Image (cartoon, rainbow, N blue to C red):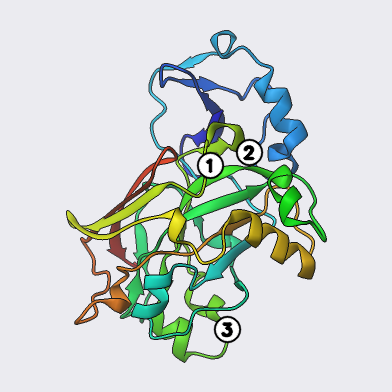
Amino acid sequence: MKLLNYGPKGQEKPGLLDADGNVRDLSGTDAVLAGAGVSLDALDKLRALDPASLPLVAEPGRIGSCLTDVPNFYCIGLNYVKHAEEAGMALPTEPIIFSKATSCLSGPNDPIVIPRGSTRSDWEVELGIVIGKTAHNVSEADAMDYVAGFCVVNDVSEREWQLERGAQWINGKSAPTFGPTGPYLVTADEVADVQNLNLSLSLNGEELQNSNTSDMVFNVVQIVSAMSQFLELRPGDLIATGTPSGVGMGLNPPRYLAPGDVVELQVEGLGSQRQEAIAAS
């Protein structure tokens, strides 16, 4: 299944993409695309519905984040070999785990608001994992049994705030609109090989990131298993799994978002995003 939220910000309705690419309205059901609403059990109930029986949405308009809210928004740092090289950092021996504030969640085509005082706002195309059931001390062999699905994430980052304003990366990761997510939550059964997905990003039409999830240092099952040794993952948790090379910080000279810039990104089979950068009012 491909699930989405559509409608004005704060008034989104849940929807399902049918086989013909049409949006079907789920608001007449008890569907909520957040938390327990995207648990494996909840997804099984949605899977049992006949899409043709659901109202057709002729003009869905704005597409919101595929998750209206998340219990936790986790990230994995330096998880592509060439990105670690461009950052001048050694490859990690264990996944580097950090968080984004959940309030940064944004629609896939909503503007990126460059915060006041920011001079180094940057882009990062990433594969997102959505957790489908409570996971604690999970083995790698069983890790996929805990995954609800996948989505596209742009892990927008303010590099000065991330690297020079204290020891916590969350400082530069969490401004409002710094977490465009979606357009779809694609259930795990729809993804044949999550470790063989192309992902790319362009800025103003110039492709700057182009890679494949096969280049991840730690793959999906390793990430889920490793994280579950330290904490309890919950249904609806979102994990952004790292970005390939080509971020603004790594260019020579470095290049960062300015008002009017347009970022376009995609992950194979999961959909695409488009954001225009604007200055904070």
Q: Amino acid at mark 2?
A: Leu
Could you tell which of marks 3 and 2 lies nearer the N-terminus? 2
The answer to whether mark 1 and mark 3 are in CB contact below 8 A is no
- Residue at 37%, 77% (x, y): give it: 116
- Whether 15 is drawn above or below 240: the answer is above
The residue lying at 48 percent from left, 14 percent from top is: 56
| Separation (CA) of disc 2 from disc 1 | 7 Å
Q: Which residue is mark 1?
A: 66
Which amino acid type is marked by label 3? Gln
Q: Which mark is residue 33?
A: 2
Compared to 208, does 186 lie above or below? above
- Residue type at mark 1? Cys
Q: Tell me, yes or no, if residue 147 can be seen here.
A: yes
In the picture, which quadrant includes the N terminus? top right
Cβ atoms under marks 2 and 1 closer than 8 Å: yes
Cα–Cα gap, marks 1 and 3: 27 Å
Front one among 172 and 205: 205
Tag 3: Cα neighbours inside 10 Å, few (<14), some, or many (≥20)? some
Crowding at dot 1, Cα within 10 Å, few <14 / some 14-19 / many 20+, comes out as many
Per the rendering, the mark at residue 3 is none
Task: Quarter of the image for the C terminus: give it.
Answer: bottom left
| Residue carrying label 3 | 168
Residue 111, position as x, y percentages in the image: 34, 55
